[in-house]
Amino acid sequence: MAAEEVTLSSHIQHHLTNAKMCSTDAGLAFNKACADSGFWTWHVDTLAWSIGLGLIFLWIFRSAAKKSTIGVPGKFQCFIEMVVEFVGANVRDTYHGNSKLVAPLALTIFVWVFLMNLMDLVPVDFLPAFAGFVGEQAFGMDSHDVYMKIVPTTDLNMTAALALGVFILMIGYSIKIKGIGGFIAELTLHPFSSKNKLMMAILIPFNLLLETIALVAKPFSLALRLFGNLYAGEMIFILIGAIGLMQLPLHFVWAVFHIMVIVLQAFVFMMLTIVYLSMASTESH
Amino acid sequence: MNLNATLIGELIAFVVFVWFCMKFVWPPLNGAIEARQKKIEDGLAASDEAEKELERVRAQGAEQLKEAKAQAAEIIEQAKKRAALIVDEETTRGQQEREKIIAQGHSEIESERNRVKEELRSQVAALSIAGAEKILEREINQATHSDIVEKLVAEL
């Protein structure tokens, strides 16, 4: 069985490690074999859980969309429409441009991130232990070599991918609405401006520096906020899970508190996306 | 925890999900919500309209009822007046008829009496003459004394 003794830190380390997949000269390799495979490593657990949850989201909402009628809606229909209306109201209040993309984007982000965050409420050892059991019984693996991280938003790749998508859209909207020239002017002629042409030219580097930092800070803050909150929450769940029987009341309290965190983080990510896109698609200053 | 190819996979998944949501999820749901909102709005407006209409019709009905009542009262009043008038007229007419009949009776009686009087007078005259003749048979010439007899008869 286990070659090394299970210590608290190795237990935590085990929980915080993704299941990896990479291709080597000998074909597909997994986990520890991928330790030095560099960029081309795939976190299969993150991918599987996130895409699975995304498909659940689309399946639920698509089935409601197919059944949607103008008449009296059922309870399921009402619930789905409440979510849609909630997101739609936020988009209408915040985004003043004219775009068919922003509202569905916000809905996707809100529900998908919420579902991924929701995995945090599954007791931390259930699914990894089950995966370890299956790995041991079915594939003859050492259960300590089976990794399973079920909360995709605790993987920086996940949150960074979302933020990167939003960042690309921000730049796209800026260029589409203001034109290339307008976008560059926004980056170079603010916040310091002068009537004098020479002064204006001198100020361009400072403006460029400040505005570029401000622009790039947006996706970074998006990605790191979600990742940080969920990673920290997961970490505390793992620590609570490691202290024996006393974990039960503590786990309950933290889980209840975490219900707020997961909804709030999904909401914040959605709101900031809308705000950033709104800023990108309106003439600032 | 380093960034790796997972980022690319998730980015593709994100794009696909958003695209699917934009094409097949958001439009029908939002469309249904908006259409229902429109329908409810229209329904409420129609109900308001109907309520106003009802109020109007009710007021109209009350007005008409009042009018009808006034008319009925007027008709009854008229009928009463008319009845009183007819009774009056008939009474007057009856009175007149009665007086006429009485007057006729009186005149008939008068003329009968005159006739009888005339008859009596002539008979009395004849009788007086006859009596006087009997008394004065020898000395009185009927022809020369008839004027005295006539005078006598006229005094009866």
Image (cartoon, rainbow, N blue to C red):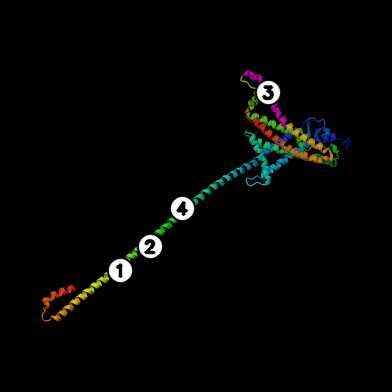
Same chain check for tags 3 and 4:
no
Residue carrying label 1:
B102
Q: Which mark is residue A208?
A: 3
Q: Is residue A284 left or right of residue B84?
A: right
Mark 4 or 2: in front is 2
Q: Is residue A14 left or right of residue A102?
A: right
Mark 2 in CB contact with mark 3 (< 8 angstroms): no
Give the amino acid at mark 1: Ile
Quarter location, residue A131: top right
Mark 2 or 3: in front is 2
Q: Is residue A148 magenta?
A: no
Q: Secondary structure at mark 3?
A: helix
Same chain check for tags 2 and 3:
no
Q: Secondary structure at mark 2?
A: helix
Which percent across, then down, holds residue B58?
52, 50
Distance between the Cα atoms at labels 4 and 1?
52 Å
Rendered residue at 36%/62% (across/down) = B88
Q: Is residue B118 left or right of residue A158?
A: left
Q: Nearer the viewer, residue A139 or A101?
A: A101
Mark 3 or 1: in front is 1
Q: Which mark is residue B35?
A: none
Residue carrying label 4:
B67
Query: Which quadrant is home to the N terminus of chain B?
Result: top right
Give the amino acid at mark 4: Glu
Query: Which quadrant is home to the C terminus of chain B?
Result: bottom left
First reached walking from the N terminus: tag 4 or tag 1: 4
Give the amino acid at mark 2: Val
Q: Which mark is residue B87?
A: 2
Which percent across, then down, holds residue A75?
68, 46
Distance between the Cα atoms at labels 3 and 1?
138 Å
User: Chain ID for label 3?
Assistant: A
